[in-house]
Amino acid sequence: MEYSELFAAIDAKPFRPFSLEIVSGRRIEVTHPDNIMILPNRQRVHHIEVYQTDPWDMAIIWPEGLAALLFPGPEAASG
């Protein structure tokens, strides 16, 4: 997966929630742009942290573990 796709999804105005799929098949929801951090920065990605609604629930993703960036389809938004 290209980082440019991820950065564009984070910076989108208006923001659209998306999921990161990792190579194990697990999907990690990103519901707000403030819930994802690229560390140490976008020029040198060491890992990605995604925070969920529960303050203790977070995922740490290493770049080689990213498989896909997924957006919900229109049917998911309607119900």
Image: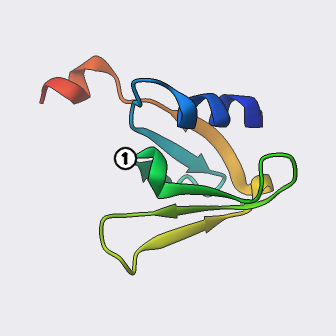
Relative side of 38 to 59, left or right: right
Crowding at dot 1, Cα within 10 Å, few <14 / some 14-19 / many 20+, comes out as: some
Q: Residue 19 appears at what percent x and percent y?
A: 47, 43
Q: Name which quarter of the figure residue 56 lies in.
A: bottom left
Where is residue 41 drawn, in percent x and y? 77, 54
Residue farthest to the left? 79
Residue extending furthest bottom?
Answer: 56
Query: Vertical placement of 57 versus 19: above or below?
Result: below
Asked where in the image residue 24 lies, by quadrant, the reply is bottom right
- Colour setup of the view: rainbow
Q: Is residue 51 left or right of residue 45?
A: left
Position of 45 compared to 34: left or right? Answer: right
Residue 50 x, y percent position in the rendering: 52, 60
Residue located 22% across and 21% down the image: 75
**Depth check: 39 or 23 in front?**
39
Label 1 amino acid? Thr
Secondary structure state at the residue bearing disc 1: loop
Q: Nearer the viewer, residue 62 or 41?
A: 41
Name the residue nearer the viewer: 73 or 13: 13
Dot 1 corresponds to which residue?
Answer: 31
Please name the residue shown 48% across and 71% down the image. 58
Residue 38 in the image, given as x and y percentages of width and height: 68, 55
Q: Is any atom of residue 28 visible in this view?
A: no
Quadrant of the rendering where the C terminus is positioned? top left
